[in-house]
Image (cartoon, grey):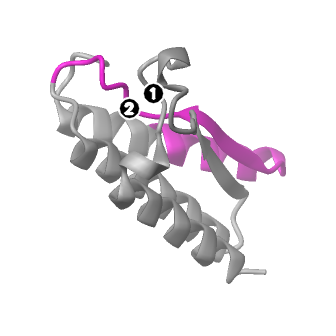
C-alpha cells in the first residue's frame, strides 16, 4: 500500500484495526498495535500525513479501550534522539524536530492513562 492514496491507506488501516479488534474479542485475548508508522521515503509523505495516520490509529485504540475492548495500546516505530537520524530507516520520529507529532503522542498517553 505504500504507493496507494492516503484515503486507500486510511481505509485499509481502519479495516485492519477493526478486524483485529473483532478477532481479539472472538478469542478473548487482548492485543497491541505495534511497529507502525509512515516513512518519509515514500512519495506524498509529510509530517501532517504522519500525524493524521498516528491520530487515526490512536483514536481507534482509545475508543476500543474506552469501551472495554481488547486493544490496550499502540507502539509506533520508532523514536530517535537528535543526532541519531543516520541510524534511521525512514520511519523514525525525532520528537525535538516534530512538535506536532510530540503533541499527538503526549495527548494519546494522557487519554489512555485517564482510563485506568
Looking at the rendered structure, the secondary structure element under dot 2 is loop
Residue sitting at 51 percent across and 48 percent down?
A: 18
Disc 2 and disc 1: Cα gap in Å? 6 Å
Residue sitting at 60 percent across and 65 percent down?
A: 64
Q: Give the answer, above or below, for where 52 lies relative to 86.
A: below
Determine which quarter of the picture holds residue 115.
bottom right
Residue sitting at 51 percent across and 30 percent down?
A: 83
Residue 58 lies within the magenta run: no
Looking at the rendered structure, the secondary structure element under dot 1 is loop
Specify the segment rendered in magenta.
16-43
Q: Residue furthest right?
A: 28
Q: Give the answer, above or below, for where 102 lies relative to 29.
A: below
Q: Which mark is residue 57?
A: none
Neighbour tally class for label 1: few under 14, some 14-19, many 20 plus, Cα within 10 Å? some
Q: Are marks 2 and 1 in contact (CB under 8 Å)?
A: yes
Q: Mark 1 highlights which residue?
A: 91
Q: Quadrant of the C terminus?
A: bottom right
Choose between 96 and 107: the one closer to the eye: 96
Q: Mark 2 highlights which residue?
A: 38
Residue 81: give x, y in percent of width and height: 57, 39
Q: Give the answer, above or below, for where 90 lies relative to 56.
A: above
Neighbour tally class for label 2: few under 14, some 14-19, many 20 plus, Cα within 10 Å? many
Residue 28: give x, y in percent of width and height: 84, 51
Q: Is residue 105 left or right of residue 53?
A: right
Residue sitting at 22 percent across and 30 percent down?
A: 45
Determine which quarter of the picture holds residue 33.
top right
Q: Is residue 101 left or right of residue 61?
A: left
Amino acid at each position: 500500500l505504500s504507493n496507494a492514496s492516503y484515503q486507500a491507506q486510511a481505509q485499509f488501516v481502519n479495516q485492519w484495526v477493526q478486524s483485529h479488534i473483532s478477532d481479539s474479542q472472538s478469542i478473548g485475548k487482548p492485543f497491541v498495535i505495534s511497529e507502525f508508522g509512515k516513512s518519509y521515503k515514500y512519495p506524498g509523505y509529510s509530517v501532517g500525513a504522519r500525524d493524521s495516520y498516528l491520530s487515526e490509529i490512536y483514536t481507534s485504540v482509545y475508543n476500543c479501550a474506552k469501551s472495554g475492548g481488547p486493544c490496550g495500546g499502540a507502539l509506533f516505530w520508532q523514536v530517535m534522539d537528535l543526532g541519531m537520524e543516520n541510524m534511521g530507516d525512514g520511519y523514525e520520529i525525532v520528537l525535538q524536530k516534530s512538535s506536532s507529532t510530540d503533541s499527538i503522542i503526549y495527548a494519546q498517553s494522557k487519554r489512555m492513562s485517564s482510563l485506568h
